[in-house]
Image (spheres, rainbow, N blue to C red):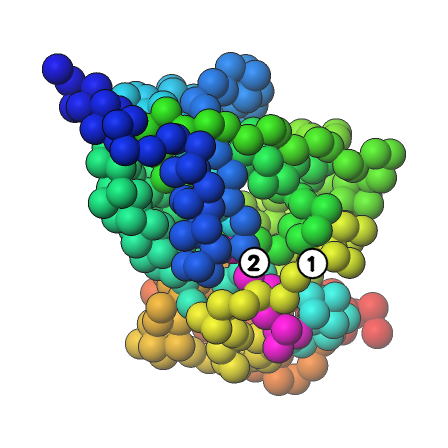
Amino acid sequence: MSDIANSKSAFASRADYSELAAQIKSWALELGFDAVGITNTELDRHKQYLYSWLEQQRHGEMQWMQRHAELRCEPAELHTDTLSVISVRMDYLHQQATPPQLLLEQPNKAAISRYAIGRDYHKVLRQRLAKLAKQIQQAAGGRHRAFVDSAPVLEKALAEKAGIGWIGKHTNLLHQDAGGWFFLGEIYTNLPLPIDSPADNHCGSCRRCIDICPTRAITAPYKLDARLCISYLTIELQSSIPEHLRPLIGNRIYGCDDCIMVCPWNKFAQAARESDFMPRDHLDAPDLIELFSWSEAQFLEHTEGTAIRRIGHERWLRNIAVGLGNAPTSPGIVEALKSRLNHSSELVQEHVRWALEQHAENARLC
């Protein structure tokens, strides 16, 4: 008899799977998750969208999206015999975090996506999901594997099917009672748990997220071209940022919150309960010049334990050079940029030269 058959029969003799599902949801809330839902592994509709998106090359340099496309759409291929997916939500916008709109109104400040100014969410959610998986295993046997944006998983599609929220026109997940400031995580399990109803879409005729996007990355409702997205340009893109997009980035040096920020459903957003998401002082509303002065050792020290560290010091400087190029011209900014003209990285030098050209042009216009 297979392992999956053993796990089913062993548990079915003790309790009903509906009771187990209710217990799982209770455990998840006790562990600090803000919502939990369960769904099956059928992703045919989302598979069609993914393959169309990839065929149009809208994933840019994210070749890993294409390499593992099949695994994203077939949970049982990623984790053998998966029958159910437990999807969880954890809110991250801390009440002490500076509102993103205020940062965009201060061009000498660095706008860092609010999800990245606290502890790395991968670590926070993964630890909690591991505990939840252990509780399930102890109660019902079976095999379980946790994921937090760390494997080929269609997490937004699964969360929508599990009733955690709906995929909005900006392609992020939304919930009527929580807005869009939250992380997602999943547990794949071979237990046949009862599934929840999918969430209904409540975007209606609203198009604020489409209209606010600085680079017009949301090309139509529910369609995103990652190659234009500021989050992609400042985090995923490893090469030069296209020149025609640099002025549109403004002071956003790591990610972009604009499409989430303007969503009307965020008036219901819940403040994060998790203290690990409290903003770290040097990342909440820092000066661009100060960040640009960090050595690689200082960058590693100040970003320790955060999601920011993964882009490395070179791309960090690349991004800040663009931000400085978009800031109002001042002797301090020009001096800071000149200090990196001879940086060992050609990538950094290129973006510094571009930034200095912007200020030279400003000086001519004045």
Q: Residue at x 48, y 55 (%)?
A: 29
Amino acid bearing label 1: Ala
Foreground: 48 or 287? 48
* Residue projecting furthest to the front: 14
The correct choice, above or below, for 69 with respect to 37 in the image is: above
Say if the magenta span includes residue 271.
no
For label 2, the crowd category at 10 Å Cα-Cα, with few meaning under 14, some 14 to 19 and many 20 or more, is: many
The correct choice, above or below, for 40 with respect to 209 in the image is: above
* Quadrant (top left/top right/bottom left/bottom right) for the C terminus: bottom right
Foreground: 341 or 209? 209
Question: Which residue range is magenta in the image?
Answer: 90-98
**Tag count:** 2
Q: For mark 1, what is the residue?
A: 269
Q: Residue at x 54, y 55 (%)?
A: 34
Q: Is residue 357 left or right of residue 106?
A: left
For label 1, the crowd category at 10 Å Cα-Cα, with few meaning under 14, some 14 to 19 and many 20 or more, is: many
Q: Is residue 197 visible?
A: yes
Q: For mark 2, what is the residue?
A: 91
Label 2 SS: strand
Q: Residue at x 44, y 59 (%)?
A: 30
Q: Where does the image place residue 259, in percent across and percent down from the top left? A: 71, 49
Q: Is residue 317 left or right of residue 256?
A: left
Pointers 1 and 2 in contact (C-beta within 8 Å):
yes
Mark 1 or 2, nearer chain start: 2
The correct choice, above or below, for 278 with respect to 177 in the image is: below
Q: Where does the image place residue 174, in percent across and percent down from the top left? A: 66, 44
Q: Residue at x 62, y 84 (%)?
A: 332
